[in-house]
Every structure is written in C-alpha cells, then in structure tokens.
Image: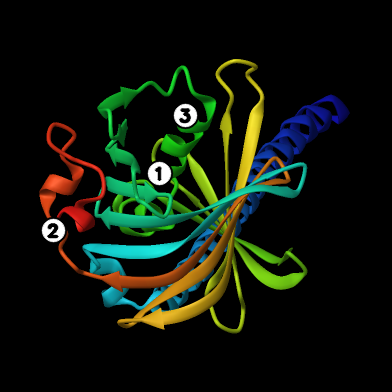
Amino acid sequence: MMAKAAAQIVPASKKVLFPMRIVVFICLCVASLYGQQDTSAETQTNQQKARTLVDQMVQALGGKAYLTAEDYYAEGRSGSFHDESLVGSTLFYRFWKWPDKDRIEITKQRDIVQLYVGDQAYEITYKGIRPLDPQKDERLRQAIIRRHYTLENVLRNWLKEPGILLLDEGPSISEGHMAEKLTIINSKDESVTILVDPETHLPLEKRFSTRDPRYRERDEEALIYGDWKVFQGINTPRMTVTKRNGETISQQIILNITYNIHPADVLFDPTVAKINPVKEK
C-alpha cells in the first residue's frame, strides 16, 4: 500500500511543478513586453518633444516666410582667424539662391568671385573663370561640406526624408547661454545638433562632425549665431562665428540683407558668369 501511495505522490508533484514553470515563463514574457512598451513610449515622447522644439524654432525663424524664401542678397564683412586672432578681413557681397547656388564677391572692387553650384566650385577673376578642385584645397573641401549641413538644408530637406530621427537631449550650454539640445539624424546616419534658446526658440549654435579623409579622424564644426534681426518677416543672424575643433576660424557680419530679389540665372552660370555685374550695368 505504501508503494502505491508513493507512486501516486510522485506524479502529483510533477503535475504541480510543470504548470509553475509555465507561469514563471509567462510572467517573464509579460514583464519583457511591458519593458519594451515602456521604452517605446519613452522614445515616442522624446521624439514628440524634439519635434516641438523644431516647430518652435521654425516659427521663430519666420515660419512660412523662412521656409519658402527663394533667394537673398547680402552685404557684409568677413574675417579669418588663426590661433584665435583676426588675421584678415574683407567686404563681401553674396547672392544666394535655393537650393544650391551661391555667389560670393569679395574685396571693395568685387573683382574676385567664389561661385558654388551644387558640389562644384569656381573662381572668377579678371583672368576669367576656372574650376576649383576640393581634393587639392582643404578649405574648399570644408566649405562644400558646410553647404550640406546648412540650417536651411536641414530644416527644408532633411525633415522631409523618410526615417528621420529627432532626439531631445535636454538642457545644455552654448557660449555661456542656457540652451535646449536637439539632434537631427537623417536616413544616411548624418547628424546635426542644434542648441536652441529656451526663451526666443532661436538657434544659438549648430554642430556637426565629419571624418577627415586623410587622417580618418573626426572633425567637429560649430556655427555660433548672434545679433538676430527680422528682415521681411525672416529672423536673420547678423553675426555668425565658425569654429573647427573648438578653434575659431572665421566670422561673418551682415550689414544688410534683402530676401527674394530673384537674381538673374546668369550670375550662377559658370559658362558666362563675370566679375562685378553691378558695375557693368
């Protein structure tokens, strides 16, 4: 009788333990599922905060007027730096046309022209026009890279791309000013970080990094914005400072700017463009 009882007890214990394993497994699965849902919810909330920061910044910049500006003409002064000291300064006259055309005339006589059309660059002087090779000129290579990371390109083009990722990175500091840190990552895994003034919602600073093809090291560039003023409904920084790996390399001051002047296409045509078109009129 005792043997029969023992035979009955052993199967009974197995029947109790087996369902318990299932219960534990189910509990672990449920906990994991809830953990994933919490992470997903946090990610969604973070992206919503980042999107709000972007929308506020675009509105502060001028909203529709900013996003639909077709071109501008600006006059100002540009300075170059070495070891944090100003080593040169010149007047500039700039014609910019969305999305990828830029004509910068320098010197008081406007007799040297830097022309950018897409990723192609040219120089125009009294000798004529010649194409420039960014592979042979490091400053030119950097200038062309900057064109891809302009605030206009990020806010007009990147945000329309599928798979765009927005990250709210919380409070930060830009040049001693409190800021909200925002990072935008496009479908090519390129990123731009923008530090936004929490009161005006205007950008204080824009950062991006690229890899130097020669030394394979990452270089970080920062553009500092200041002295904002509204022109034709568009908030414009009248002073910008460019830093590379923490060192100031250039500064631009805008003295006057006019939007939507619709400059002639010939100004950006490398086959016929000339120096000082204003003087020739």
Residue placed at 52% from the left, 32% from the top? 139
Residue holding disc 3: 141
Q: Nearer the viewer, residue 243 or 2?
A: 243
Neighbourhood count class around disc 3 (C-alpha, 10 Å): few under 14, some 14–19, many 20 upward: some
| Labels 3 and 2 touching (C-beta < 8 A) | no
Task: Looking at the image, tell me whether mark 3 or mark 2 is earlier in sequence order.
Answer: 3
Q: Which mark is residue 281?
A: 2
Q: CA distance from mark 1 to mark 2?
A: 30 Å
Choose between 14 and 72: the one closer to the eye.
Answer: 72
Query: What's the residue at 34%, 44% (across, down)?
Result: 111
Q: Quadrant of residue 25?
A: top right
> Label 3 to label 2, Cα distance in Å?
33 Å
Mark 1 and mark 3 residues within 8 Å of each other at the beta carbon: no
User: Looking at the image, can residue 224 be seen?
Assistant: yes
Q: Are marks 1 and 2 in contact (CB under 8 Å)?
A: no
Q: Which residue type does callout 3 highlight?
A: Arg
Q: Position of residue 20 (x, y in %)?
A: 70, 44
Query: Tag 1's secondary structure?
Result: helix
Name the image colouring: rainbow
Mark 2 neighbour density, 10 Å: few (under 14) some (14–19) many (20 or more): few
Question: In the rendered structure, which amino acid carries the disc numbered 2?
Answer: Lys
Q: Can you identify the residue that label 1 sits on?
A: 147
Q: Earlier in the sequence, mark 1 or mark 3?
A: 3
Is 177 left, or right, of 143 in this rendering?
right
In this rendering, which labeled residue sits more in front, label 1 or label 2?
2
**Position in image of residue 13 (x %, y %):** 77, 37
Residue toward you, 195 or 47? 195
Which mark, residue 18? none
Q: Look at the numbered disc 3 and give the secondary structure of its residue.
A: helix
x, y percent for residue 203: 54, 68
